[in-house]
Amino acid sequence: MPMRIIPDENQPSAAIEIPLEKPLPDYDLLQLEQPTPRDIDVILVTQGFRDLVDDARGILTELIAAPPAEHHSSGDVLEIDLATASAHPLEITQLTGAICPDDEETYRPGLWIVLRDPAAPPKAPLPKSSLQRISAIAAELVKRLQLA
């Protein structure tokens, strides 16, 4: 069940759906596949899932300030100077839990993120460059949180 990026047709924004594909013991999220959406609701209100959302928000904020192509690595430590990082127009308009169905009629918890480009014309779809940036940010977020 891969991550999906869903651009809005007449808005400069896109939704990112990231289903949790493997257990995350650090967040006490072990049994992810559930038979009904109601069973996922129970997972989305746990402290572990709230901690995951908080961590995702921190990483996402960092990635928006300095997108993956702009990161500089010093050995094993990633260094980003937020004071001098280039301004980036993307905004987080939503970050919450999601109920993600799969092809086998089971459900998984996931993250639902909506990013908006306020510099793009209103009532117009995202520019291709913004969509590519959102894809890179989402991929890096999945990698850092080890969601797949």
Image (tube, helix red, strand yellow):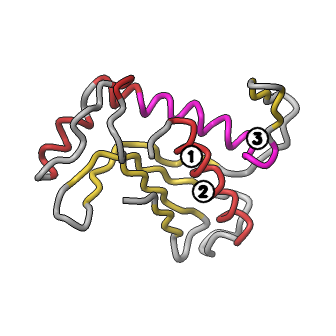
Residue most toward the front?
75
Q: Main secondary structure of the magenta part?
A: helix
For marks 1 and 3, give the CA distance: 14 Å
The residue nearer to you, when weighing 27 against 54, is: 27
- State the SS at label 3: loop
In magenta, the rendered stretch is 52-70
Assess disc 1: are there few (<14), some (14-19) or many (≥20) residues with their C-alpha within 10 Å of its C-alpha.
some
- Residue 116 is marked as 2
Vertical comparison of 34 with 30: above or below: below
Any magenta on residue 54?
yes
- State the SS at label 1: strand
Any magenta on residue 111?
no
Callout 2 amino acid: Arg
Q: Residue at x 75, y 28 (%)?
A: 78
Q: Quadrant of residue 87?
A: top right
Q: Which residue is mark 3?
A: 66
Q: Residue at x 24, y 67 (%)?
A: 103
Callout 1 amino acid: Ile
Callout 3 amino acid: Ala
- Quarter of the N terminus within the rendering: bottom left
- Residue 92 is marked as 1
- Residue 72 % position (x, y): 83, 36
Q: Is residue 82 visible?
A: no
- State the SS at label 2: strand
